[in-house]
Image (cartoon, helix red, strand yellow):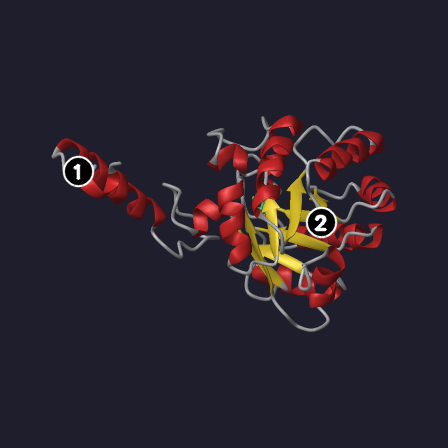
Amino acid sequence: MADKVTAPKIRGMKANGSKVVCLTAYDAYFGRLADESGVDLILVGDSMANVVLGYSNTVPLTLEEMAHHVRAVRKGVSRALLVADLPFGYYNASVDQAVNSAVELMKAGAESVKLEGDYTEAIEAMVKAGIPVMGHVGMTPQSVNNFGGFKVQGKGEAGDDVLRKAKAIEDAGAFSIVLEVIPSTLSKRITEALQIPTIGIGAGPDCDGQIQVFHDALGLSRETFRHAKRFVEGENLLLQGIKDYACEVRNESFPAAENGF
Ligand code: KIV
């Protein structure tokens, strides 16, 4: 495919000033919708733990669950770069563990992996093994227990540490980096300091691109978040469709003659 998006192309978008549009997806159907809409990068995010599997955070997600969903999304995505999240506990123990987990997700169909935090030796080893890596700093949800909740990170002097981590991740060979729920002034500093594109979520307008969780952006979640915008009220549309179906079955207007054989 001529305009297939690759990790080097995403990296190059910073130099030519094109905003990188990123969205999560967790199955073939939503992956296909995102791909056909021209999204540049589709992340099989570990946010699936919350929005698909019903957990209260991303900590319980397993590598097997992630690989299962990567295989599904792969079937719907052909143009966008397909990135898979390394779940908590599958890269934190050692460089070997990180590389082995990343290889498993690549074999499932990912074209890159994302991991949270400055695991720079693991990033170097994965890049050496041929795996493009996306970094992730700021409010990294897998560390919710350290943070004591989903709180804004990098306020005041703590911003220097987030910038230091982002720089180390770039130096280790990452092709882009997610900045999550940090002050807009800090993400501007980081974006100016790095050569690789910064992808923001709750990180203000100065990032080189943006990412949203599919269910948040499409109005499919009950909660509303300051870092997200509901571009359509998807849940209302779906509820109305299901109610209409139930109503027509009960009043016997569905199935009609044209639905029969
Ligand atoms: O899992 C996820 O959806 C993410 C994005 C919010 C960046 O990591």
Q: CA distance from mark 1 to mark 2?
A: 48 Å
In the image, what residue occupies the spot 54% across and 47% down?
A: 31
Q: Give the position of the C terminus as an image quadrant.
A: top left
Residue 201 placement (x, y as % from top left): 55, 53
Q: Residue 54 appears at what percent x and percent y?
A: 46, 30
Q: Quickly name the residue at label 2.
A: 134
Position of 190 with respect to 218 (left or right) is: right
For the residue pair 159 and 175, the one nearer the viewer reads as 175
Q: Is residue 222 left or right of residue 190?
A: left
Up the image or down, 176 lies above or below 188; here it is above
Amino acid type at mark 1: Glu
Element at label 1? helix
Residue 92 lies in what quarter of the image?
top right
Q: Count the numbered circles shown.
A: 2
Q: Which of the two marks, 1 or 2, is nearer to us in this view?
A: 1
Which of the two residues, 204 or 244, is positioned nearer the viewer here? 244
Indicate the position of residue 233 as horizontal and vertical percent values: 34, 51
| Residue farthest toward the bottom in the current orientation of the protein | 16
Asked if residue 19 lies left or right of residue 235, the reply is right
> Which class describes the residues within 10 Å of circle 2: few (<14), some (14-19), or many (20+)?
many
Circle 1 residues within 10 Å: few <14, some 14–19, many ≥20: some
Determine the quadrant in which ligand 1 lies: top right
The answer to whether residue 168 is visible is: yes
Rendered-image quadrant of the N terminus: bottom right
Residue at mark 1: C-beta within 8 A of ligand 1: no
Q: Residue furthest front?
A: 261
**Which of the 4 image quadrants contains residue 222?**
top left
Question: Considering the numbered disc 2 on the image, is that residue within a helix, a strand or a loop?
Answer: strand
**Residue hosting label 1:** 248
Left or right relative to 41: residue 126? right
Q: Say whether residue 155 is visible.
A: no
